[in-house]
Image (cartoon, helix red, strand yellow):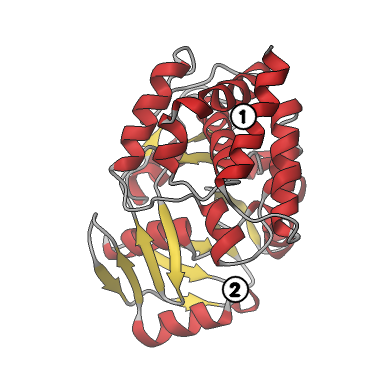
Amino acid sequence: MKLFVIGAGAIGGTLGARAFRDGHDVTLVDADAAHVAAIRRDGLRIEGPVEEFVVRVPAILPEELPDTVEHAVVAVKSLHTAAVADLLRDRLAPDGYVLTVQNGLTADVLIEALGRERVLASFVNIGADLMAPGVVLQGNVATFRIGELAGGPVTPRVARLAEVLPYAEATENVLGYLWGKEVYGAMMWAGAVSDLPIAETLERPEYRGVMTAISEEVLAQAPVTVEGFDGFEPDDLPGSFDRLAAFNRRSAKTHSGIYRDLMVRKRKTEVDEVHKDIQGPVFDRVVEMIHDIEEGRRTCEVANLDELARFVAVRTG
């Protein structure tokens, strides 16, 4: 399998580097010219407590993609999904397919451009960050599931991808995992309005009301049976918060990618893409706060989380 990983940042870089080191034919594709140049010059460096290594993996810009692509992994931020769909629209081979490893429910954008039968989905909970051009931090090892969007028995192509990509396992209910990630992600969005580490936002008793309310909002909208992972169990939210806090304390990644987008990289987050799939009074308020931070009317601080806690307390009486 010749695999193009489109988006060589945190997750794309981690998966691509390890698959390449395992002997697979991988090419990284990224729109960041400095990142591509650094990988070409020095290789891609994976740092962190899991393992540190450098791979001399091929890296190209999007315009350097060949005319025909058989297999691709889409690992860009969700707000760039449409651009990748356009990039692949006339390139994807008739019997080819793509796997999205993105946050959120992004498959519909790819399906519209490529066809439902050529899109696979996955759930990835590995903690990773792009630290500098050519450098990715892998903070932990966590759940990674691949499956057909329609569910059902594992197909040969899903099984093959699970063999090629590190940490991956096949599943018959990938949407269930994705909706579980939506619940966990909602907690991360709420926590990102402050500057507290992930584990602290999950374990502090004064924020349990926020985490419970926003989780219940998402669970109420899930159209499938939600799957548990890495300590999260949809039918045990109080225990999930404790277990997820412990899980995050074991990771070298202390703050979410959302927080890094807001306070380190100073760039627009994926919140509007997520908001298309999830609505509700608490999440709507979080989205307003994220917009305020993006546009300079707020900064990430505990006062925002305290305000959110008061909002939830008033709503719940």
Q: Secondary structure at mark 1?
A: helix
Q: Position of residue 149 (x, y in %)?
A: 59, 32
Q: Position of residue 47 (x, y in %)?
A: 30, 65
The three-letter code of the residue at mark 2 reads Leu
- Asked whether disc 1 touches disc 2, contact meaning CB atoms under 8 Å apart, the reply is no
- Using the image, tell me which numbered label, if any, was put on residue 50: none
Query: Which residue in the structure is indicated by mark 2?
Result: 65
Q: Quadrant of the N terminus?
A: bottom left
Disc 1 residue crowd, few under 14, some 14–19, many 20+, Cα 10 Å:
many
- As rendered, which of 116 and 292 lies closer to the eye? 292
Q: Nearer the viewer, residue 26 or 183?
A: 183
Q: Earlier in the sequence, mark 1 or mark 2?
A: 2
Q: Vertically, is 191 above or below 133?
A: above
Residue designated by label 1? 309
Q: Circle 2 sits in a helix, a strand or a loop, which is it?
A: loop
Q: Position of residue 155 (x, y in %)?
A: 46, 32
Q: Nearer the viewer, mark 1 or mark 2?
A: 1
Residue at 63% from the left image edge and 66% from the top image edge: 266
Going by the image, does 285 lie left or right of 177?
right
Q: Is residue 131 above or below residue 14?
A: below
Q: Give coordinates of residue 57: x percent, y percent.
A: 37, 74
Residue type at mark 1? Answer: Ala
Pick out the residue farthest to the bottom: 41
